[in-house]
Amino acid sequence: MTTRPIRPRRSTLAVPGSNPKMIDKARGLHVDAVFLDLEDACAPAAKAAGRKNIIEALREGGFGEKIRTVRVNDWTTPWTYRDVIDVVEGAGAQLDCIMLPKVQDAAQVHALDMLLTQIEKSHGLEVGRIGIEVQIETASGLIALDAIAQASPRIETLIFGPADFMASIQMKSLTVGEQPPGYDVGDAYHHILMSILMAARAHGKQAIDGPYLAIKDLDGLGRVAGRAAALGFDGKWVLHPTQVDLINETFSPSQDDYDHAENILDAYAWCTSEAGGSRGAAMLGDEMIDEASRKMALVIAGKGRAAGMKRATVWQPPE
Ligand code: GLV
Ligand code: MG
C-alpha cells in the first residue's frame, strides 16, 4: 500500500476552466478542493482558451489551502496530451493533481504517470509530487478497478462519475444520482459505490462521490450524499455554492459521534495502560470497548480532526 499522504476532501468544487469569473468565485468558497475542468464543462471550441485561463488562474493563486486539481480530457479524445503538457508546463508548481476522467484500465493511468514524470523532469519540478485523481465512470473502469487503483503511487482518489456511468451501463433514467424509476428493490448504485470504496480502502486512496445535478434540490443532495457518507466515502463533488455547507457537514461526523470517538480512544488507552489494569476489553458506560472499537473510533475521530472539530466532552478516568 502506498504511503503518499492524501489530504482529505469532503467537498470538491467543479469549475469550468473556460469561465474566469467562476474560477475567481471558487477562490472564496469553503471547499476542501477545487477542480478546474477542461473536460465536459468545457466545449470543444473552448478547450484552448480554457487551458490558458487555467494556467493564469493557477499562477495568480488565491486558492488558500484548497487542493488544486485540473481535469483533463480522457485518452480517447485528441486533447489529453495537450491539456497535460500545457497545464503542467505552465503551472505545474501551482497544481496539486490532475484528474483523469473515464479511466478504463491501468494503462491509461500509466500513460498519464509517464507523461507527468517527463514534464516534471524536464522542468525541474519535484518528480511524483503531482497526484492523480481517477474517475470511474464506465463499465470497463469498474471491472478493472483493482488494477487501476494500483496503477500509480500518484493516485489520491477514486471518484464515482454517476452521469457518465449511467450512460455507460445504459441505465433507464435521466436523473443523475437518483434511483432509476421502476427499480424498487434497493439502491441501484450500491454495487458500484461499494466496489469503488473497497478498491479505495484496499489501496489507501480516498473514495469520492461525483456530482448531484439538481442544484436546487438540497433534500435530494442530502439523501444521496448521506448514503455515500454512511458507507464510508470521504467526500462528494459540489457544483454550486449552495451545496457546499451541506456536503462539508454530511462528510464530517456529528458532534456527538466525534466526542464519543475521542472518548473511546481516551478510555481505551487508559484501560490498556498499567494504571487502568492492562485490560484489552473494558466498559465505557453501557458499552463494551476493545481493540476493534479503538480502530472504529480512530476513523471517526480522524474525520472530525481533519474537519477541525473540537471536543465538547472529555472522558476522565475513575478516581
Ligand atoms: C462526472 O464526471 C459524471 O460523469 O458524473
Ligand atoms: Mg463524467
Image: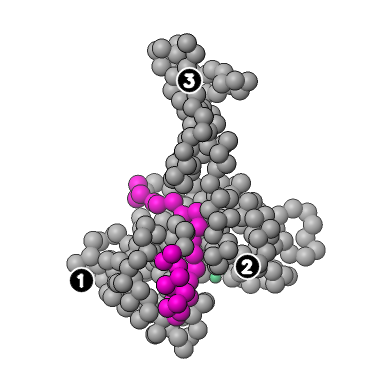
Local SS, label 3: loop
Q: Residue 215 carries which label?
A: 2
Quadrant assignment, res 83: bottom left
Please rate how many residues cluster around mark 1, counting C-alpha atoms within 10 Å: few if below 14, some from 14 to 19, many from 20.
few
Q: Which kind of residue does numbered mark 3 sit on?
A: Gln
Instruction: Give the residues drawn in magenta, as a range.
Output: 3-28
Q: Answer left or right for 72 relative to 252.
A: left
Residue that numbered label 3 is attached to: 316
Can residue 73 be seen here? The reply is no
Determine whether 269 is above or below 155 in the image.
Answer: above
Residue under the point 39% across and 85% down: 48
Point out which mark residue 122 bears: 1
Residue 311 placement (x, y as % from top left): 48, 34
Q: Which of marks 1 and 3 is nearer the N terminus?
A: 1
**Does the magenta-highlighted stretch encompass residue 203?**
no
**Mark 1 C-beta closer than 8 Å to ligand 1:** no
The image shows residue 89 at horizontal and vertical percentages of 27, 74
SS of the residue under disc 1: helix
Q: Which amino acid does label 1 sit on?
A: Ser
Q: Going 27% across and 66% down the picture, which residue do you hit?
A: 93
- The label on residue 104 is none
Labels 3 & 2 near each other (Cβ < 8 A): no
